Image (cartoon, helix red, strand yellow):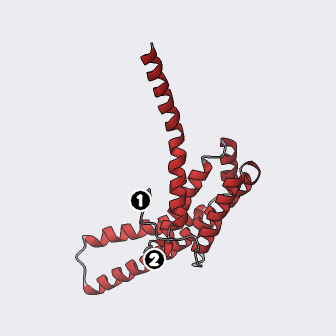
């Protein structure tokens, strides 16, 4: 009977310990993102990386709010779908034109016209992509501000953490000095 009780106690304590493990993992990931140095990221991929990391921060912080608050956040703030639609249309045009060009035997004047069209579409994609990520980062900062305002009453610590992320991502977005960035060679979670 003692062995059974001991095993039951051991099993229950291991289940309880696992209950707290995701919180520690989330805290470690938030610290890694807070200390991430975006000046070392390739300039071409920078806005995509910042946007992806902001989405991750928002998803981690949303875990600590209840379901009603989550739906309220999303109802109050909407991402302009026009940005995404324009970017997607430009990508589709480029893909269609690229597929059409790959199998053609055409004269040199036609080639010049085709490549001029590809360049125009490529420039359009680059422009739409910049507009999209600019709108998405602005949207994410607004979401973080709503989360911060929600935690102002319920959880002062998460309010403070959210405010730090707002300052970090605002500085990163404006290409300002990021005082929180540091090289983290012993990162607990690799990105």
How far is mark 2 from mark 1, CA to CA? 20 Å
Residue located at (54% from left, 68% from top): 133
Up-down: is 137 above or below 156? below
Q: Position of residue 183 (x, y in %)?
A: 46, 70
Q: Is residue 27 left or right of residue 44?
A: right
135 w.r.t. 73: above or below: below
Q: Viewer-nearest of labels 2 and 1?
A: 1
Looking at the image, can residue 33 be seen?
A: yes
The answer to whether residue 144 is seen in the rendering is: no
Determine the secondary structure under disc 2.
loop
Q: What's the residue at 30%, 87% (across, down)?
A: 109
Front-lying residue, 118 or 61? 61
Q: Which residue is mark 2?
A: 43
Where is residue 184 shown, x and y percent of the image?
46, 66
**Where the N terminus falls, by quadrant?**
top left
**As drawn, is 102 to the left or to the right of 183?**
left
Which residue is pictured at 29% across the width and 82% down the height?
Answer: 111
Tag 1 residue = 190
């Amino acid at each position: 009977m003692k062995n059974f009780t001991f095993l039951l106690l051991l099993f229950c304590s291991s289940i309880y310990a696992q209950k707290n493990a995701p919180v520690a993992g989330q805290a470690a990931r938030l610290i890694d993102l807070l200390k991430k140095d975006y000046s070392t990221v390739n300039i071409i991929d920078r806005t995509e990386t910042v946007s992806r990391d902001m989405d991750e921060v928002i998803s981690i912080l949303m875990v600590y709010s209840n379901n009603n608050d989550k739906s309220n956040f999303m109802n109050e703030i909407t991402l302009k779908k026009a940005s995404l639609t324009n970017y997607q249309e430009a990508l589709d045009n480029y893909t269609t034109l690229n597929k059409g060009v790959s199998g053609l035997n055409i004269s040199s004047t036609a080639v010049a016209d085709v490549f001029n069209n590809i360049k125009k579409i490529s420039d359009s994609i680059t422009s739409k992509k910049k507009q999209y990520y600019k709108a998405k980062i602005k949207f994410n900062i607004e979401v973080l501000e709503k989360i911060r305002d929600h935690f102002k009453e319920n959880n002062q610590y998460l309010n403070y953490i959210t405010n730090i992320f707002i300052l970090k991502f605002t500085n990163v977005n404006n290409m300002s000095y990021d005082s929180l960035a540091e090289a983290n060679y012993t990162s607990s979670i690799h990105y």
